[in-house]
Image (tube, rainbow, N blue to C red):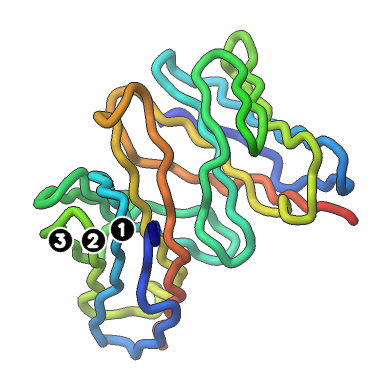
Amino acid sequence: NAGVTQTPKFQVLKTGQSMTLQCAQDMNHEYMSWYRQDPGMGLRLIHYSVGAGITDQGEVPNGYNVSRSTTEDFPLRLLSAAPSQTSVYFCASGRGFTASPGPNEQFFGPGTRLTVL
Amino acid sequence: DAKTTQPNSMESNEEEPVHLPCNHSTISGTDYIHWYRQLPSQGPEYVIHGLTSNVNNRMASLAIAEDRKSSTLILHRATLRDAAVYYCILRDLAGNEKLTFGTGTRLTIIP
């Protein structure tokens, strides 16, 4: 299994440009999510999905869109990049509570380091 | 969401045990205690979780206080590879998958 993969690893954008961060998992996980991590901070939840066709907002959703058309993929779109979106972005997946009693571990990708000039 | 409190940083000598504390005085009866760690320039990785009883796995042990208001992650024999930021996170049983990360404890291992 490749686990959770993210592309690209690094990206530089100019203010106002749009782009899509890709996330894919091959573990057949229902739950997927996107976090951002600013320097010296913990991770903050942007958007999450509990299954194909279902998405919801996290703590910091403004400026980002997501969709979940397949179980495997969960892309994150920046509509009009701003310098405040300079951060490291992590995608995560997990089987979800319904898979077995109690919470299950989540698996994180290696991250995408985004700089907006 | 119930909040956790951890020291900002800790140091430990290589090959010695490390005890990482976490306070969660407002924990509810349905909250699981999770620990994740983040190695430099990597995404977080799961370490261990528990509800009431102490737990052991190949990576670490989790000791949970009887009143559940605090817990301790124990690394039995720290190696340089254990240098990371360790996050203590509460997750409720109501089906909420969301992980709320604080700033964690930065563990430095001294060779």
Residue B22, quarter of picture? top right
Sequence-wise, which precedes: disc 3 or disc 2? 3
Mark 1: which amino acid? Gln
- Circle 1 marks a residue in which chain? A
Residue, disc 1: A25
Give the camera-side residue of B106 and B47: B47
Label 1 vs label 3, nearer the camera: 1
Residue, disc 2: A74
Answer few, some or many: residues within 10 Å of disc 3's Cα (few below 14, many 20 plus, some between 14 and 19).
Answer: some
Which residue is at 26% across, 86% downward?
A16
- How far apart marks 1 and 3 lie (CA) works out to 15 Å
Query: In the current view of this chain or complex, which residue is farthest to the front?
Result: A1
Mark 2: which amino acid? Phe
Q: Position of residue A91 (x, y in %)?
A: 37, 59
Residue, disc 3: A67
Which part of the image, by quadrant, shows the N terminus of chain A? Answer: bottom left
Which residue is at 74% across, 49% downward?
B107
Give the camera-side residue of B77 and A17: B77
Contact check, label 1 and label 2, Cβ < 8 Å: yes
Direction from residue A83 to residue A31 in the image, left or right: left
